[in-house]
């Protein structure tokens, strides 16, 4: 009998249903995977579970996989959070530029939480700001889908000819943890509406769809059922246990399998995840260095000479990725004994 990677998964994780194209999904050797989205994606890099599990689900035969987490907390399909001092257009252009630098073969994108939870009147200004401020729920959803499609066009164009897979991931559900934290049932019901819209968008564009909402128990949580967790620290932001469950839900939703008898507490898995976390830390400082205003923008006359140090992260990242590859092989070798 298969033992869940995380014990809570046996209660919290429903079988996920991804609407996949005819050909089953599989990672390939030397795939470059870009993870794009808002807070739930950015926070994943801190814990390492999602990337570790996706990497192991590729199997021992797929070698040289690399992952780049370019999530941005608070981001939306409008690019509001990624812009610094200009309009959201600046943020969208920045995202396209980073995707071009990463050159992914697989693009995994997760948006929708902010849109589902925020009323139209509360959204920030952008070229469509007047439309958003006056829109009702139906119009807001339509605007979200239209803008998501435009953002995907930008990312696909930035990725170039090497891109072979685009996977749209629905937002995960929020968690009902009981008083004094709020009941997230209504928010989860709205997330289900956006989940359906993202599924339809994926189908219309010929992309894969991964139903993380259903895979992490959203259908029960929207009825007010308490979580078996806690998987989050506050009902919204997932912690270590939550990202372990999320990683398994993503593997399952893609139709992949984890190695038998895999344990989160196995020293080989722990070492692999720690190396993934270190690689993510180095890459984060490479693509989002502190004090960018001083390094590259209008205050660079003061400290712009330090910008030369940013590319120095590249060999450190490459070294850590070699370590990740070696530790991944250790896990597979151990499981084969």
Image: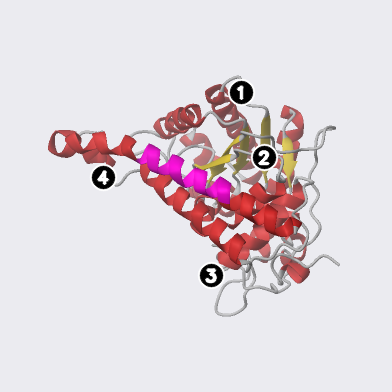
Is residue 85 among what the camera can see?
Answer: no
Label 2 – label 1 distance at C-alpha: 18 Å
Q: Which residue is mark 4?
A: 291
Q: Which residue is mark 1?
A: 162
**Do the CB atoms of the residues marked 2 and 3 lie less than 8 Å apart?**
no
Q: Which residue is mark 2?
A: 168
* Residue 20, x across and y down, in percent: 80, 38
Label 4 – label 2 distance at C-alpha: 32 Å
Within 10 Å of disc 2 (Cα), the crowding (few <14, some 14-19, many 20+) is: many
Label 1 – label 3 distance at C-alpha: 38 Å
* Residue 247, x across and y down, in percent: 66, 55
Q: In the figure, is residue 28 to the left or right of 162?
A: right
- Color encoding of the figure: secondary structure
**Do the CB atoms of the residues marked 2 and 1 lie less than 8 Å apart?**
no
Q: Which mark, by number, is residue 233?
A: 3
Q: Quadrant of residue 85?
A: top left
In the image as oriented, which residue stretches furthest toward the bottom?
A: 179
């Amino acid at each position: 009998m298969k033992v869940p990677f995380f014990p809570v998964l046996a209660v919290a994780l429903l079988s996920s249903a991804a609407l996949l194209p005819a050909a089953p999904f599989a990672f390939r050797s030397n795939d470059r995977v870009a993870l794009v989205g808002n807070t739930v994606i950015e926070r994943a890099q801190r814990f390492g579970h999602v990337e570790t599990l996706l990497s192991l689900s590729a199997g021992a035969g797929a070698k040289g996989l690399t992952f780049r987490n370019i999530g941005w907390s608070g981001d939306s399909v409008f690019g509001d959070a990624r812009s610094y001092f200009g309009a959201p257009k600046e943020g969208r252009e920045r995202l396209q530029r980073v995707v071009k630098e990463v050159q992914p073969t697989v693009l995994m994108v997760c948006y929708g939480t902010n849109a589902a939870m925020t009323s139209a009147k509360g959204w920030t200004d952008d070229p469509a700001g007047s439309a958003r401020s006056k829109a009702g729920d139906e119009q807001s959803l339509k605007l979200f889908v239209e803008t998501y499609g435009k953002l995907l066009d930008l990312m696909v164009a930035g990725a170039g000819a090497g891109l072979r897979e685009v996977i749209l991931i629905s937002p995960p559900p929020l968690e009902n943890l009981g008083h004094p934290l709020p009941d997230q049932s209504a928010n989860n019901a709205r997330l289900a509406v956006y989940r359906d819209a993202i599924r339809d968008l994926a189908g219309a564009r010929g992309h894969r769809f991964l139903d993380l909402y259903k895979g992490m128990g959203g259908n029960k949580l929207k009825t007010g059922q308490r979580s078996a967790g806690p998987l989050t620290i506050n009902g919204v932001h997932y912690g270590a246990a939550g990202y372990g469950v999320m990683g398994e839900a993503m593997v399952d939703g893609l139709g992949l399998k984890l190695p038998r008898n895999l344990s989160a507490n196995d020293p080989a898995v722990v070492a692999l995840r720690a190396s993934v976390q270190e690689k993510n830390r180095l890459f984060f400082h490479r693509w989002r260095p502190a004090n960018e205003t001083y390094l590259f923008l209008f205050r660079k006359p003061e400290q712009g000479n330090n910008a030369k140090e940013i590319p120095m992260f590249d060999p450190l990242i490459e070294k850590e990725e070699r370590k990740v590859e070696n530790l991944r092989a250790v896990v597979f070798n151990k499981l084969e004994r």
